[in-house]
């Protein structure tokens, strides 16, 4: 059964590549996208080599205004889980070998809601800061990354909502996410921290 599933996914990915590869700004070697997926603005999406995007994910890169640049970059060796939604209106970069669990949301934008007379769906999309997920980091199940930068080799716990930048070699959990551990370069071990990242 496992073999048939893998074969099915492989064939789906090959089919996707055959029909849609040329639409992307770059589609690297050994990169696989397993259908069904939703892709918006493929001309703004750069997929490096050996990237894997699992089923039911959405990759979107659409600028808010036509005068603005927009790019979604997924670097070599990244693994994107099922039901991920990665949405750039300006810049989202996943550095090399980022791993995302299922249901992860990553975005550099948000709906404006301030006008109480207008339905939120009719209000403009606002630009948040650019998003970067550092090399070798792992985003847990259902994590939300909202307009922030996450450093290298970080862990974002399951269900965390990350609203502030995260330094390299940190573990963050919760809503809003706080730092609970960091790697101490001097002692070479991971140590518990206060929420501001200082060691306990
Ligand atoms: C963050 C995580 C990696 C745990 O890291 P860890 O270093 O082993 O941390 P610990 O288990 O020692 O937990 C440390 C503290 O954080 C809490 N914690 C751990 N994960 C948490 C989470 N996702 N949300 C909220 N709190 C969490 C623990 O309860 C513990 O609290 P305490 O000190 O008050 O008892 C793990 O809990 C997690 O969320 N993993 C993601 C799993 C996943 O999504 N898998 C998908 C497969 S790709």
Image: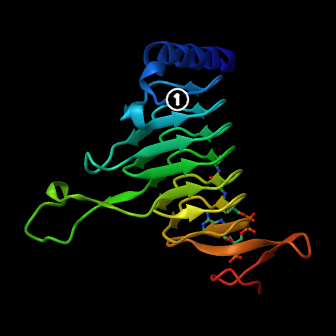
- Quarter of the image for the N terminus: give it: top right
State the residue at coordinates (45%, 28%): 24
Q: Is residue 30 left or right of residue 102?
A: right
Q: Position of residue 79 (x, y in %)?
A: 63, 39
State the residue at coordinates (92%, 75%): 187
Q: Mark 1 points at which residue?
A: 26
State the residue at coordinates (41%, 48%): 88
Q: Where is residue 181 in the image (x, y as percent from the top left)?
A: 73, 73
Above-or-below relation of 129 to 95:
below
Q: Position of residue 173 (x, y in %)?
A: 61, 68
Q: Is residue 184 left or right of residue 117?
A: right
- Quarter of the image for the C terminus: give it: bottom right
Write down the quadrant of residue 126 in the picture. Answer: bottom left
Q: In this view, does 51 lie to the left or right of 12?
A: right
Indicate the quadrant of ligand 1 in the picture.
bottom right
Above-or-below relation of 49 to 88:
above
Above-or-below relation of 68 to 15:
below
State the residue at coordinates (18%, 55%): 121
């Amino acid at each position: 059964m496992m073999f048939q599933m893998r074969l099915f996914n492989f064939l789906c990915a090959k089919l996707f590549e055959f029909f849609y590869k040329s639409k992307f700004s770059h589609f690297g070697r050994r990169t696989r996208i397993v259908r069904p997926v939703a892709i918006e603005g493929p001309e703004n999406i750069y997929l490096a080599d050996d990237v894997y995007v699992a089923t039911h994910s959405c990759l979107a890169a659409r600028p808010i205004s036509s005068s603005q640049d927009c790019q979604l970059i997924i670097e070599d060796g990244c693994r994107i889980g099922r039901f991920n939604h990665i949405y750039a209106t300006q810049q989202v970069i996943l550095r090399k070998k980022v791993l995302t669990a299922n249901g992860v949301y990553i975005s550099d934008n948000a709906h404006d809601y301030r006008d109480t007379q207008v339905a939120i769906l009719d209000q403009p999309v606002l630009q948040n800061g650019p998003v970067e997920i550092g090399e070798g980091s792992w985003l847990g199940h259902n994590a939300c990354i909202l307009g922030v930068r996450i450093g290298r080799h970080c862990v974002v716990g399951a269900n965390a909502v990350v609203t502030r930048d995260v330094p390299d070699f940190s573990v963050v959990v919760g809503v809003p996410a706080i730092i609970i551990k960091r790697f101490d370069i001097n002692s070479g071990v991971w140590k518990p921290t206060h929420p501001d990242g200082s060691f306990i």
